[in-house]
Image (cartoon, helix red, strand yellow):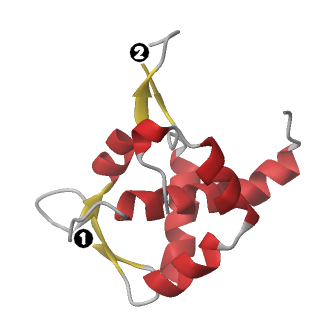
Amino acid sequence: MEMDKATFVNLAPEYYMLAFFIHFEYPRGYYSEKGLLKDFTVPDEDSDDYCFVENEALRRQALRLLLKHNAITIIDDPFGPKLWQRGEGFERLQDALDNSPQAHSTKRECPASLGCGL
């Protein structure tokens, strides 16, 4: 299925936000970009690996949206990478995303190896 650029630009940040929520389902107190990339990278038959969230600009946009909804807190670590933690608005935004058309599509299309249930 082909998608025009305007539709992609409108939908992609929400798909990336859903990836963050899926990543946050793993029982950890803190999360990192390295962990997110690892969790969404799978072996590809035609190349070494394929990362479903490889686009840095879309990851940044998803983070901005999560921050806007107070769904995450970003912790700057002077000795390591930035860390993320669930924010006060996490559950509220998760409920809203669970009811979005993108969430239902992602649940159907996400590879089982990623454990993609929201």
- Please report whichever mark, 1 or 2, sits nearer to the chain's N-terminal start: 2
Q: Position of residue 9 (x, y in %)?
A: 76, 53
Nearest to the eye among marks 1 and 2: give it. Answer: 2
Q: Amino acid at mark 1?
A: Asp
Label 1 residue SS: loop
Label 2 residue SS: loop
Return the residue nearer the eye: 13 or 77. Answer: 13
Distance between mark 1 and mark 2 Cα atoms: 32 Å
Q: Position of residue 30 (x, y in %)?
A: 23, 67
Q: Which residue is mark 1?
A: 76
Q: Position of residue 105 (x, y in %)?
A: 70, 52
Q: Residue at x 45, y 81 (%)?
A: 90
Q: Indicate which disc residue 55 carries.
A: none
Quadrant containing the N terminus is top right
Rendered view: 111 above or below 81: above
- 13 left or right of 56? right
Q: Position of residue 27 (x, y in %)?
A: 24, 65
For the image, the number of numbered tags is: 2
Q: Residue at x 41, y 15 (%)?
A: 48
Kindly give the residue lying farthest to the left in the view shown. Answer: 79
Q: How would you rate the neighbour count of disc 1 (Cα within 10 Å): few for under 14, some for 14-19, many for 20 or more? A: few
Residue 95 placement: quadrant: bottom right
Return the residue nearer the eye: 108 or 62. Answer: 108
Q: Residue at x 37, y 83 (%)?
A: 87
Specify whether residue 39 is in view: yes
Q: Which residue is mark 2?
A: 48
Residue 83 placement: quadrant: bottom left
Q: Amino acid at mark 2?
A: Asp
Rendered view: 91 above or below 55: below
Q: Are marks 1 and 2 in contact (CB under 8 Å)?
A: no
